[in-house]
Image: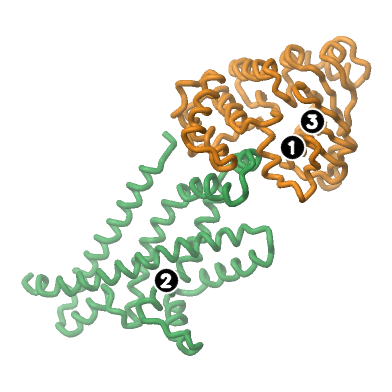
Amino acid sequence: MAYALIVAPHLLWGALVTIQLVLASAVGILAVGLLISLAKLSRWMIIRLPAKVYVDFARSIPLLVMLFLVVFSLPGLGLKLPVFWAGVLGLVLYYGAYEAEICRSGILAIDKGQIEAAVALGMRPVQVLRRITLPQALRVALPPTGSLFIGTLKGSAQVAVVALPELLRTGQDLAVSSGRFLTIYLMVTLVYLGMTFLISTGVGILERKLRIHD
Amino acid sequence: MIDVTDLHKWFGDHHVLRGITLHVDRGEVLVIIGPSGSGKTTLLRCLNRLEEYDKGTIHIEGKDIQDSRHDIHQIRAEIGFVFQRINLFSHMTALENLIEAPMLVRKRSRVEAETQAHKLLERVGLRTKANAYPHQLSGGQQQRVAIARALAMEPKVMLFDEATSALDPELVGEVLDVMESLAHTGTTMIVVTHEMGFAKEAADRVIVMDEGVLVEEGSPADIFERPKHARTAAFVSRIL
């Protein structure tokens, strides 16, 4: 117990890195997801096709492979990123593809009649998108996006392999140096549980706030 | 104010509009009737280019609506459209539905748009429903909000596409009442409907369409009591 108190600050520090990693990734995932979903719905093949290739590619490889590609292969192409941002990029490219599919189904769920009504009132395509389509699509997309962010949090543990001292990596280092594997990994598990609980609660609250029906 | 000349439209192989020529005057209430599948709705949707047409021209106040020099969004803003399926914005209250386009398209201030919206809701008998969401309203109330939403743009012409066909029978009357009072205020209206009572009461002129052509036109009395064309007579006898 006493030992747990000693290592707790270290683990919380690691958890803080994990939180930063997930927050930064979440912003990127939303942006990529939205843009790629719109690209996939474009009427122009030249925009649609690259988006489709990206989504199919990203969803067909393991996250670890994506992280290795970004962290270890990009420097070979002359792109050197700090390891934190390389981790973010890997997570964004991987989970952004899933978010794109979530957003796309959200947009497709919107009643076409409402879009037509907006057009008939003289709204321009960007106005229709911003005021009619997206506000409704995002409501539909919110619950699966929350699940995806929990997935991102869990996936962020894999960034440990590229030596970023996030939660799991910090725990691993402590466990190896002290030999107290059970204590450390149980603590790591608890912190992950706490964080996923926070995300799902937050999304739940947001969902209730945005709900219009019933 | 509206001139349609030799309008043709194909859906694939299906020749839906086969040379429609039509003129509508300012302040006129024109009712279009005809069997389903005769092209009434398609004609109406062509008038604000919700549907593209393949041949012929449509001029609204002298502007060719397919001419790329005219901004189609601005042309649409001048044409109110009321849908069979109502199509209110479901994430907005009645009031928000009414002020959205005036603020976004007409660049009105919120205060100005809301003042006008409250007046219009009063006019369609829904003064107390300003803050209700569409799902909290009956079908008839929703359609009255939709009419008010179209009127909020102060359009030069109002198009009604079977505005009462999707409603429960007991809710049809309240919508027709709003449409009739609108007709009596001198609004230019083109109304596709199966409601012969409305046509008799409010129409200046009735057009009968069948299989993509105009079969016959005349006053309500001409069409309903003295149809010249056999197809008109057959259709009228079926629905009256």
Q: Quadrant of residue B3?
A: top right
Q: Are marks 2 and 1 on the same chain?
A: no
Front position among marks 2 and 1: 1
Q: Which secondary structure lies at badge 1?
A: helix
Q: Which secondary structure lies at badge 2?
A: helix
**Chain of the residue under label 1:** B
Q: Residue B128's x, y, as percent?
A: 45, 21
Q: Quadrant of the N terminus of chain A?
A: bottom left
Q: Amino acid at mark 3?
A: Met
Q: Quadrant of residue A52?
A: bottom right
Q: Residue B5's x, y, as percent?
A: 88, 36
Q: Which secondary structure lies at badge 3?
A: loop
Q: Residue B199's x, y, as percent?
A: 75, 16
Image side of residue B87 versus residue B197, left or right: left
Q: Quadrant of the C terminus of chain A?
A: top left
Q: Which mark is residue B45?
A: 1
Q: Which mark is residue B85?
A: none
The structure residue drawn at horizontal position 40% and vertical position 43%, both measured from the top left corner, is A210
